[in-house]
Amino acid sequence: MEHLKIASDNYVAFTFFIGTMAMMAASVFFFFELSSTPTKWRTSVLVSGLITFIAAVHYYYMRGYNLATGDSPTFFRYVDWILTVPLMCVEFYLITKKAGAKQGLLWKLIFASLVMLVTGYFGETIYRGSSVIWGVISGAAYFYIVYLVWFGEVSQLAQTAGAQVAKATKTLAWFVLVGWAIYPLGYILGTPGGLFGIQLVADPALASHYMDIVYNVADAINKIGFGLVIYSLSRTQD
Ligand SMILES: *C/C=C(C)/C=C/C=C(C)/C=C/C1=C(C)CCCC1(C)C
């Protein structure tokens, strides 16, 4: 059997490898910093570490899968997201809880994120032929999350939770608006006719390679960046 290599010209395997390392390093950092974190921020920093740790385990697996088959590990990609994106919703809830966030808000965020991911999974796998419509439904759920964190309950609560929480929430909101918007680009590149029927990359193997690179870069930015925003909040006086 021919064995695929993480060579300098295999960018897909390389980003899976770097992704694994980055997520591992971030997890070690967040976990070790816990002991010097003020008690009221400890759960938030712990959740940051859990997010990168869950991703590290999935990346390790996905890296191996990609090397062995050359394919895109779509199933484990979505298992990872279904665990980590709701945990990011938990972060919004935890930092606005002092200002009175109710569990109802947490469930709204989690529900929207699950709709976003499950419909995206349908479009990428079982119902590839109708990827556009699934992508649109997923996008609607995404914009609902954007609405909640920019104008809805999350942003309103953050305003009354002190200057540092308000500032951190605004930075996280930018991650959701700009960082998370990278994912639909990967979807459009990777699924046939993803952009309302337009085929951006004709060769299906190449298309899925581009998609994996885009997803890997987005994960590193969003999971580690998000965690670092929470970490720096935990080092403020608020
Ligand atoms: C750590 C993983 C994160 C933050 C994953 C986020 C994923 C998304 C924001 C995915 C969004 C999608 C759309 C908005 C439309 C097309 C389908 C998806 C699932 C790629």
Image (tube, rainbow, N blue to C red):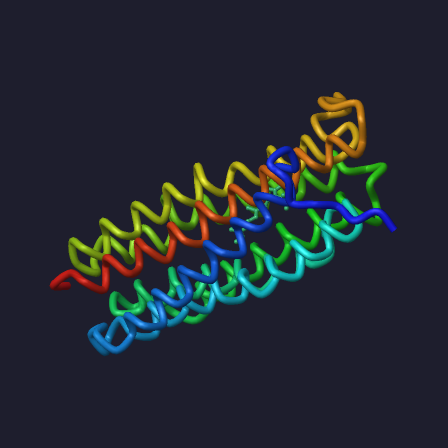
Instruction: Determine the residue positioned at 20% across, 58% down.
Output: 160
Q: Nearer the viewer, residue 50 or 96?
A: 50
Q: Nearer the viewer, residue 68 or 154?
A: 68
| Left or right of residue 100: residue 205 | right
Residue 12 horizontal/vertical position (percent): 64, 40
Residue most toward the left? 237
| Left or right of residue 71: residue 110 | left
Q: How many marks?
A: 0
Instruction: Determine the residue positioned at 85% across, 37% down.
Output: 129
| Left or right of residue 119: residue 129 | right
Residue 208 horizontal/vertical position (percent): 73, 37
Q: Quadrant of residue 27?
A: bottom left
Q: Quadrant of the C terminus?
A: bottom left
Residue 165 horizontal/vertical position (percent): 23, 57
Tell me: residue 124, above or below residue 200. Answer: below
Tell me: residue 46, above or below residue 212. Answer: below
Residue 149 horizontal/vertical position (percent): 39, 49
| Left or right of residue 210: residue 55 | left
Q: Nearer the viewer, residue 203 or 66?
A: 66
Q: Quadrant of residue 157?
A: bottom left
Instruction: Determine the residue positioned at 45% across, 44% down.
Output: 146
Tell me: residue 190, above or below residue 103. Answer: above
Instruction: Determine the residue positioned at 66% across, 61% down.
Output: 61
